[in-house]
Amino acid sequence: MGLEENFETGKVYTLKNILLKSSGVFIFLVLWEISPRIGWADKQFVPPFSTVINELIKLSASGALTMHIMVSLWRVLAGLIVAALIAIPLGFILSKSYPLLIEMLNPMLRFLSQANPFTLGPIFILFFGVGELVKISMIAWACIWPILFNLITGIKVVDPLLEKSAKSLNISPFQKFIKVLLPSVGPWIFTGLSTGVEISFFMVVAAEMIGTSAGLGWLVHNAGMNNKIVWIYSAAVLIIALGVLIKWFLGYTYDRLFFWKTAVDFYSEGRVHKRFDKSEVVFIIFMLVVILGFGAQQVKKADYQSKNMESHDHLELYKGSGDFQ
Amino acid sequence: MSRKLNNVYKIIVVLVFFGIWEFISRTEILNPVLVPAFTDVVKNIWDMFLAGNFTKHLVISLKRAGIGFALAVVTGIPLGLLLGGWFKTVQKSLEWLMIIFSQVNPFVMFHIIILVLGIGEKPKVIIIMWACLWPIITNTISGIQNVNDTILKAARGFGLGRVAIFIKVVFPASLPSIFTGLRLSAGYSVFMLVAAEMMGASSGLGWLIKSSEETYQILNIYGGALVIALLGVLIDGLMQLLEKRFTGRIKADYLNSEI
């Protein structure tokens, strides 16, 4: 496959390679643009790409998009933080101090991990009411399992040689945790976190379509309910772009946090492995804080709007969640 | 600890979990209206079974998930084999497009799929198929492209032709990776099924939960959640069994790197 060569020479982003790789996307977009225009596809159902982008720009200029994006991202991030706060300490404590217990709990945990967050939604509503807490707990539920299982596996496969040499060097338990355990388990935790993010971004859109008053999923649902087909496409383009961006960001962060590891997956070709710059760290922390702070404020704003406007869309949305067929 | 004893402990842990659930509800630590006792939930499922309508929803749901998954397998594996094995340039040129497509949330396209295919079974099946397709394709491609070079060279050294190499070496060696994709997809199929049925259906397990929620039948909500979780465990176990059966002889070092 030549991954090693790429890793050494770093000659992946040659012009030829980029042209080759983007050709598929380019051809697809061109097809999308011309097929409604020359009548291969119904213009009503498949608006040309330029129209969709145009509409997206108009929507974002009206300022409504920021709120929906921030609300969705905030939900994902809040759920992820809750999941990480539960799963990471639990995984460490259980598998470090009671390794046998983890072994015994395994079937039970597998069973719980199969409990679909959508089916648990109504149960969470019984406990938490219909506010943000339900969505966050649904997302947290979905995120806990990949983090926990990855962490347990990660601790299992820590190189015993490293642990023994650390022991023979007589380091303190705290130092052992920081210098041996964390660097070996870190990549596993991060893999769990990224799986969680991808699942929950996927989930949040679906959950918002079932019943909320803001967020990216609501944007799509609202467009569908109002028969604005162009808006559906615009929202879809936006969601896909965000999804690709998140995926790219996760890969980028993995390569810089764990620069000594080569993550081999389908999309890993030509990735650069080095440490984070300071400015990058500052930027990422800044973005996370913005999502948490600004997002929370946007969630409140959305909540306020939906309560006070007795919005027509909201009623439509409620009806729409019942029976098709 | 012996393996048998270990299994006994595993079963005990599961029983303890349901025991605690029962205990919390019976002693009214948590409101038994919100958390019905485990035995009541099981009894409710049994009653629904006897009444017959539960089996109907279960069969409908399984049919949707099964057809969607089967369609994804039938299209995904050949497509992955073709792209990964023969048309590598095409695969390279499609790589970024595939990244984009795998991010397409099928629910976002729900309204458009309905416009094109109409309401009924087709949109749900297509949604499940779309979600299942991408793990299968990517895992098939990465499996086929990572077959150990040494084994390939040995096969060529024995004078095997292209077709023979594919049937005897490349395909078996990439099976573990293909099965990873299949297992992921099987999990997705249940996941998507429930969400799709909650969004717009008038039958199936997801709908059962949604309508129970709207009519405050809390026992049904718990019952549905329990059955769906059990279904997930069973499907995952079945996939693991199949994986063992078909890839038992294939060792990890048949691939260049573990994926």
Image (spheres, coloured by chain):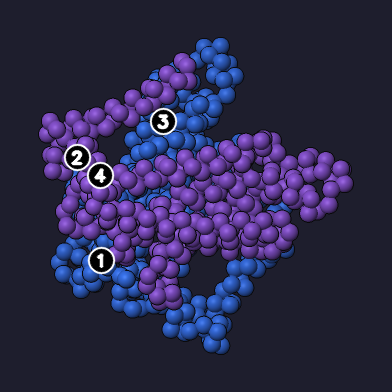
The alpha-carbon separation of the residues under discs 3 and 1 comes to: 37 Å
The local crowd at label 2, few if under 14, some if 14 to 19, many if 20 or more residues have their Cα within 10 Å, is: some
Badge 1 element = loop
Q: Looking at the picture, how far across and down is residue A284, in whole percent?
A: 44, 48
Q: Is residue B9 above or below residue A11?
A: above
Q: Is residue A104 above or below residue B244?
A: above
The alpha-carbon separation of the residues under discs 1 and 2 comes to: 28 Å
According to the picture, the residue beneath numbered tag 4 turns out to be B46
Foreground of the two, B123 or B61: B61
According to the picture, the residue beneath numbered tag 1 turns out to be A322
The alpha-carbon separation of the residues under discs 4 and 3 comes to: 27 Å
Q: Colour of chain B?
A: purple
Of tags 4 and 3, the one toward the viewer is: 4
Asked if badges 4 and 2 are on one and the same chain, I answer yes
Residue type for callout 4: Trp
According to the picture, the residue beneath numbered tag 3 turns out to be A106
Image quarter (top left, top right, bottom left or bottom right) of the C terminus of chain A: bottom left
